[in-house]
Image (spheres, helix red, strand yellow):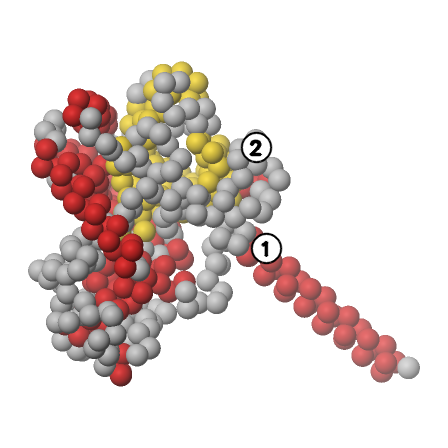
Amino acid sequence: MSLDGATTPAAGDGRPDPAGGSQSGHANGSINGAGQQNGVIAPPPTYLTHRLRLNPNSDHRPDNYEDLELDFSPMVFSSLERYLPPNLLLQPREVKVNYMREILVRYYPESERVRIQKHREYRQKIISNYQRLHRELYTMHASNFFVPSFLKAINENTEQGFRNIMSEPSPGVFTFEMLQPRFCEMLLAEVENFEKWVHETKFRIMRPNTMNKYGAVLDDFGMETMLDKLMEDFIRPISKIFFAEVGGSTLDAHHGFVLEYGMDRDVDLGFHVDDSEVTLNVCLGKQFSGGELFFRGVRCEKHVNTETQSEEIFDYSHLPGRAVLHRGRHRHGARATTSGNRINLLLWCRSSVFRELRKYQKDFSSWCTECQREKKERQRQSVAATKLELLRREGQAAT
Ligand SMILES: [Zn+2]
């Protein structure tokens, strides 16, 4: 294995601490009896299969679910709706909601929903007590946040437009100028202010994931709505083009946080995969040396520990304001930050539709380099066997 001295990745590593997603609402909220999951009321027989189509109905305009009290984010319902069986699309909204909720409930077990609800309450407690430093950070102000080249590409919304501002130094790793220096400074100051408040009030905060001892979850102190917008309006259009095969066009939940590296912070980060379909990683500053990101190929769960091929080795040095966008299953890690402090903004973007569909599809890991290699090998062997068989028959015919 050529893991460059890094630790071996294990599936499930790097899972966020609490309620990583952004499901909103109430754990026990119900619409028209949809909450009765305990078998008291049997579901209508037509819905027994509760399946989704494999391909979205792109002509269909989904309903808006924002006014309903739901235990999952309204965005999840809107994006899931395109995958409903055709006979359901013309049904009233309540019917569709119940059907989709059945699927989601199966996906998120009761214990998970209780955990999400507890985390909501925890968030609410922070949000109502913490005094914000820069209020303008909490709502999306695109022209103040992003550099003009990035905004132009988003407005154009074409593959060529994105290619013009991005470089792809290694397959599936895209880097581009994204954040204005002023925005980076403000976000750094906000995080510092939040940590000062945490320290002074002795508020117990949850760290972004199981691997980092420093850093803060931005969603926990009020930035959830802004980051949802960032994912929906800026990351999803790019992912739709470059990461379609891992659910890039249906990203509907996120986990947003900052990580802090330095001699007095987390020094490095072991080899791992993210609990995301697509990961945005932007360096916010400040002064530092070291801390390179290293990439080692995209792998599915089954192949996460397989050998790295030489063409998959790629190292990247962070520059403040510059973003890196990659698949969550692209194995990576961060080398030691040898001096100064480095702070990065991370947005793990997820697609519940993609995760649900993966369960039904047999050959769904076309994006895994090792699955591709195995498939090619099988084809090569079958071609070789056919040739051999033809030769044998020719030999028989000649005698
Ligand atoms: Zn694989």
Look at 49% across and 65% down and name the residue there: 363
Q: Position of residue 379 (x, y in %)?
A: 63, 64
Front position in the image: 212 or 316: 212
Under mark 2, the amino acid is Asp
**Identity of the residue furthest to the right in this view:** 399
**In the structure shown, which secondary structural element does the residue marked by tag 1 occupy?**
helix
Of the numbered discs in the image, which one, if any, rests on residue 373?
1
Look at 48% across and 37% down and name the residue there: 271
Q: Position of residue 193 (x, y in %)?
A: 18, 24
Give the foreground label among 1 and 2. Answer: 2
Q: Is residue 341 visible to the viewer in this orientation of the structure?
A: yes
6 left or right of 61 in image: right
**In the structure shown, which secondary structural element does the residue marked by tag 2 occupy?**
loop
The quadrant of the image that shows the N terminus is top right
171 versus 32 height, above or below: above
103 versus 233 height, above or below: below
49 versus 286 height, above or below: below
Of the numbered discs in the image, which one, if any, rests on residue 4?
2
Look at 77% across and 70% down and name the residue there: 388
Q: Is residue 141 visible to the viewer in this orientation of the structure?
A: no
